[in-house]
Amino acid sequence: MNDTVHITVTVNGEQRELDAAPHHTLLDVVRDDIHLTGTKECCVVGECGACTVLVDGRPMNSCLMLAVEVDGSEILTVEGLTDPDGRLSALQEAFLTTGAAQCGFCIPGQLVSAHALMAAHPEPTLDQIQEALAGNLCRCAGYEQMAEAVFMAGKEGDR
Amino acid sequence: MQPFTYARPETVEAAIALLAEHRGDAELLAGGTDLIIELRNRWKTPKVVIDLKRIDELAPAIVEKDGFLSISASTVMADIVADERVQRLFPALVEAADVVGSIQIRNRATLAGNICNGSPAADTAPPLLVYEAEVVIAGTEGRRRMRVDDFIVGRGEVALGDAELVTAIELPIPAEPIGSAFTRMTRRRGTDLASITLCCGVDSAGMTRLAYGSVGPRALLILDDSGVLADPAATHEEKAPYLDRMFVDASPSPTSMRAGPEYRVAMLPVLGARALQTAIERLAHAT
Amino acid sequence: MTTGSVGTSQPRFGGYGRVTGRQRYLADIHLEDALHVKLVTVPSARARIISIDASAAKEIPGVRLVMTAADLPDPMPRHGPQYQDRPVIAVDEVKYHGEPVAAVAAETKEAAEEAARVVEVAYEELPAIVTVADALAPDADLVQERSIRRPGSLIDSNVLCEYNFGWGDVDAAEADVVVEGSYAWPAQTHFAIEPHGFMAAADEDGIVVWSTIQHPYQLQKTIAQVLDWPLAKVRVIAPDPGGGFGGKQHPKLEPLIAFMAVKAGRPMRLVLTLDETFMAVRRASAEIQVRMGFKRDGTLVFQDFANDFLVGAYGDTGDRITAKASWLSAGPYRTPSVRIRARAILTHTTPTHPYRGFGIPHVGWARESCLTEAAAALEMDPLEIRLKNLARKGEEHVPGDTPADGEWEQTVRKAADEIGWGTPTPPGRGRGLAIGVKSGPTTGLSYSIVRLLVDGSVLVFSGTSDMGQGARTIFAQIAADELGVPIDQVSVVMGDTAIVPFDQQTSASRSSVLMGNAVLFACRDIQAQVRGIAARSHDLDESEIVVDRGTVQLPDSRLAIVDVVKAGLGKLGGELIGTGEMRKDAVPEHPLGGTASFFEFNCTAVELEVDEKTGSITIDRHVTVGDVGLALNPIQVKGQDDGAAIMGLGHALMEHIIRDDSGRVRNVGAIDYRIPTSLDLPLELESFMIENADGPGPYGVKGISEGSLLVTAPAIAGAVTDAVGVVIRDLPMSPERVWRAMREHS
């Protein structure tokens, strides 16, 4: 009953072998087992987006999926947006430039959602941005600054 | 979450065998956007969770076959929204699927799951009713088909046996153009559970199909063949009594936190008239 | 030579961590050997606890401690920022839905959750008081026993405290027109995206408590008090909160965690779920009655307020919110006679906690709405009636308090211009405008230490919490400019009472003024030392030297501070240490304990349309203008102003806590408590600043951060009236509420 399931996942480009309890969410495993704490926990009902990660390129709420479901998948967390040498992506830079990060707690989820948007639409419109980020709540309400940042990064082209 | 065993069958038959083995103690997992919440809150405490996503037959796919557009059980809302055929043939389904939660949810939530969990507020139920969609069900006795209208029973209840699962939802490709539109009522413009979901379809023969949810135990489909509602030349005043008649069975919950029953009842003809108008315009554009 | 970072949009300190996921919030910190804590509650707003049986819970593998009132000192230690009435854990009676009755500590989070589920609490549900009317009924049960009330005439009532403010004689005032109305503000919750979290580890040297708290020094004091330990044995580590909005100001569950850590001899960790934060903290609701008297030409003759704030089961800051907000009920208007009766009323609900705006939005909603209604009654323009009565700079709008401290008319006219007031309104639209004013801190005490190191880099130590407002950045800007170093040579240290000196609190938009001045004074202390060094090095008298803004002015040359210091410190190196103290002393005879150190002044104007069939509001343009004195960092000011405006929209349009008949909160969590998303913004939102450098902070700054949500609701309600003719006096202005108003109107 409490048996773990062996899974193979690629997290931020690095392949990992894990033994996951079936009833642990991907969020639990990312934060507590892999120790990637950039992914945040807030509402755990898929409403706030603080736990957003990319699964095979698509943004999803890691609180609403079992870790065992991602066996064989590629996961990207906020930590994977930065170069190995710590250099920021154009998107991250733009978030700093526009002052989008205030308390910062929602920002990892926002960045991951925005990253997925830009992979599909390298130069997104403001409407596309607001829609793509609608699943990421920000109580500081830096929505305009974030949209401006994504727009700016789109115009510059991600490096 | 209470611990459980995770099963990942590779065939529909294997999944059904697991269901049969664990009758009542097994839960099916597709998108999980409702199930994981139910598990975490211990509203459901299954012994086995059966993940359907490794079953080839159920893999995300939207295909045309035998006059139907068939949407497999693992197909998520985002794929439906992006599909050119669904956009062209069933625009109201696209409109409904596109407001199911956020993009994070739409990348996980499946159309089949949206119908199978029997939520009265399921956004996709009204368009599936209007388009006269059918569910394809697999069980120990083989396969069967059923109209979505018959499949949906009541709050949290669908006509699915303990050892059955839905393999696909299939929409008949209309021979003649249908004009259709979806609309809903929410508390904010961002993602929300609707206090009214509504879809309207009209065809050139003058038939109006109107389906609405979130105002009773299940979404309802009402037909009107008077021709008045579908008539582009009829005035709002002429249509109003016909429209009002379509909502007599609405029975919104008196205790909902989302909107009061009186308001919901008052809004049904407002939303109905708007969706009808859009449907008529779309039909005119298509013909 | 001056770097000139003040007044420029310097990148946020801590920004790198925030965009890379490396920022360590409380939940990201793991203590070795820590036990996981889960709270046990009962599903009642009020219940008598009969017994608690933890035997089944203790059977669960990994469970190390189940704490109940029986395990705590008798009498139960109580704490609170204003009233020390909140028990460490519920004793005898649960007084609000979600009040913990027990807590379980286990080796894993799962074991703790499992065990918390099987702690058997036998309880008797009692009728709960959840409304003002119920609380004030003559035969009402008392929410608090006499033993935890302050002595006085109110002890046998549910009125926690009552205030009577005012001047002139309202009853004798002769008005041509009297307008009145009752306005209600619902309970709301903070919904910071970071849920509250707490950890504690005790050993023979004392205790360390980690918390998402905004006021680490107040937590230190509270823990020392409940444990009866010296302050020096209590260390509080407060990582940058992931949003506070007032909800993280005062201690709540930390005393419980501290007792548990001491009892078990193991570190404790409790990170709340979002749902649990709903039970832990909320904003006051209020019912406010206003009467306003005018001369025929719109001149205010009197304002008469009866404000009832519904504050919860324990005092917390309920009295302070009631008093401070009510004190300014009459707003920024000169009014010959004002009468304010304000009460804080106890109920079986979550204790009221501070929330951005501190009650001012509640009174502002009532006053500004009533003014808009008065304009209609007098057939005047809503802008004109406000400008006619608005206090001009130097006038005492509240006699005896700080006079109007800004060019307020300039702020109002800017907002009016930006919304196009006076130009034809597009068909189907309406415009509304409202003015908000809030007292800054009435007392304050902030210390800072600034160390200029031998290589010319700088350390700033400050007890402020950087929870999104960007306090680190502005303190770095001040130090960089005053000491003449590039801003990237400055580090700002916060959040540890063992390292940073005392700061009273991070609240009331105080930090740029009070801590800003403390940092400035610490830099000036260093400048004074530099003057001495320069005098010695150049064989001059100190009177011949001026040190200011990074430079040392000698009679015949100008040097950089850093160069003078490097030369002066010589071979041994070392550093210069500056200390700064900024004190805003109490005024004992003042009803609030002190005068306003500044006013946060805002004018909000909106243009919107209402769907006449559904009642749904679409905001086409939303303008907010704040008198900021001077923007130390414009991009951060804009972030705070835009953010507050959007938060204000949430409060006005969608947010409210819904309770059932027995007082339980129904909409716990994110699904049925709605806050604005990126799709809920006005079609256009613009924030503007008025900068006259006339504030009491460094270089003339005033506090910001709350202004843009002070009067969002009345501006919107005024525009709804303008658009469709209906008056709304309850919130939120959901489509259903607007629709009902339109139906009744027609």
Image: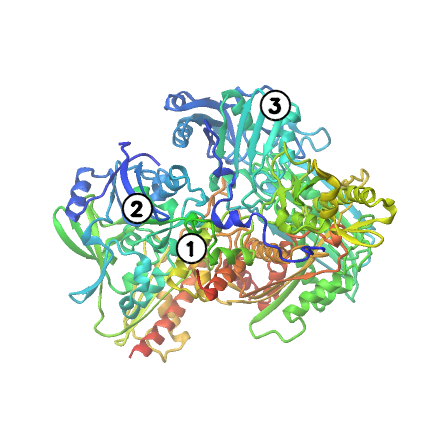
Q: Which residue was labeled with disc 2?
A: A70
Residue C93 in sight from this viewpoint: no
Q: Is residue C533 left or right of residue C457?
A: right
- Nearer to us: label 2 or label 3: 2
Where does residue C236 sit, x and y in percent of width and height?
60, 32
Three-letter amino acid code of the residue under disc 2: Val
Q: Which residue was labeled with disc 1?
A: A113
Q: Which residue was labeled with disc 3?
A: C227
Residue C472 in sight from this viewpoint: yes
Task: Decide: is A89 above or below B282.
Answer: above
> Where residue C463 is drawn, which disc sits there?
none
Local secondary structure at mark 2? helix
* Chain letter, disc 2 residue: A
Local secondary structure at mark 1? helix
Q: Are marks 2 and 3 in contact (CB under 8 Å)?
A: no
Task: Decide: is C518 above or below C363.
Answer: above
Name the residue nearer the viewer: C648 or C546: C546
Task: Decide: is C3 above or below B22.
Answer: below
Name the residue nearer the viewer: C504 or C404: C504
Q: Quadrant of the N terminus of chain C?
A: bottom right
Three-letter amino acid code of the residue under disc 3: Leu
Where does residue C304 sit, x and y in percent of width and height?
74, 52
Name the residue nearer the viewer: A34 or B225: A34
Q: Quadrant of the C terminus of chain C?
A: bottom right
Q: CA distance from mark 1 to mark 3?
A: 46 Å
Determine which quarter of the picture holds residue B146.
Answer: bottom left
* Chain letter, disc 3 residue: C
* Chain letter, disc 1 residue: A
Q: CA distance from mark 2 to mark 1?
A: 18 Å
Three-letter amino acid code of the residue under disc 1: Ser
